[in-house]
Amino acid sequence: MAKKHCDLKNLGNKNMTESKNITNSQENPETLEMLGIGLLKISETNSDEKFEVIFQKGIGMPLIQNTMEMYIKEILDRKQGNSIIPVQDYTIFMYYFQNGENIIIILFMNDKEDSLSYPQLYLETKSIRNSFRLNTPISKIKRAINERITIPIVDGIAALFIIGASGSPYISKVKKNRAAIADREVVIGGFISALFSFSREVIGIESGAELKEINFGNQTFYVIAKKNVIFAYLAEKVNLILRRYMHLIVDEFLAKYQDCLINFDGDVMRFYEFENTIDQYFRI
């Protein structure tokens, strides 16, 4: 990663017409659209330099971890600042400030080819900073960010199955016009689990290879297995952002439910609220 520092405050004072604006939602002109946002916290008294993720949407843990590994010492030394960080096809705009014994970090993520409006970034960071200064409850801060900043919701997924290693479905979401699939979700879950296990035996676990795709004519099941959970996406068309979202769903599900998955008691009701997370990324 390369980076450069910028002064959001000075940029924010410039004429807004001089910058290309972030895509605004037609429903709400105050809503900003970007690829992702992360809100983090570091305690200055934490000697091992660990960080806590307060809120994330559209930006995955691997990218957050890589960014923090590279810049956490700088953040702790400077206490306040901002940087522009090019990352492959994306750009990360990082802003951080001291709040009591903690340092709050905001990560804005967008496509490298799209320009973010610095005045709008300045206003957004100012709003978040003021919320912390006024000791606004974290739940209210997260809700406000979620309402003000949107990410693209993509088409192309006909069904999503999150399945246990034994084939038992944790949660599934199927398009309404695919009722036949919805009626057979248990059978489909068992089939995917069995086929996945068989492929690993045939290919060989030691090789590190795993089945990634199951082709059915003009449709494909894209399968990701991690920590004994199988994520199967029935897709008709796939693009870069959709692939990225597939991995984000994996990371967010495992982060949210990792404790109960260790000794799963068979109660799938707890997974139903995850449908709200799915709806943030996919139009199913």
Image (cartoon, rainbow, N blue to C red):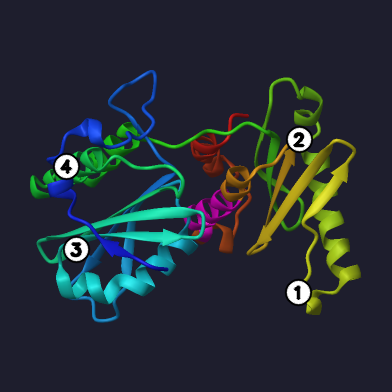
According to the picture, the residue beneath numbered tag 4 turns out to be 12
Q: Nearer the viewer, mark 4 or mark 3?
A: 4
Dominant SS of magenta comes to helix
Say which of marks 3 and 2 sits in front: 2
- Closer to the chain start, of discs 4 and 3, is 4
Query: In the image, is residue 174 part of the stretch drawn in magenta?
Result: no
Task: Check disc 4: other Cα within 10 Å, few if <14, some if 14-19, many if 20+.
Answer: some
Residue range in magenta is: 247-258
Q: Which residue is mark 2?
A: 236
Asked whether, in this view, residue 192 is left or right of residue 40, the answer is right
Q: Is residue 208 left or right of residue 243?
A: right
Asked whether 146 or 179 is in front, the reply is 146
**Label 1: which secondary element:** loop
Amino acid tagged 1:
Gly
Question: Observer-nearest residue: 18 or 204?
Answer: 18
Residue 208: give its label: 1
CA distance separating discs 4 and 2 = 43 Å
C-beta proximity under 8 Å, tags 1 and 2 = no
Between disc 3 and disc 2, whose residue precedes?
3
For mark 3, what is the residue?
A: 103
User: Mark 1 to mark 2: distance in Å?
Assistant: 27 Å
Query: Can the viewer see residue 267 in this picture?
Result: no
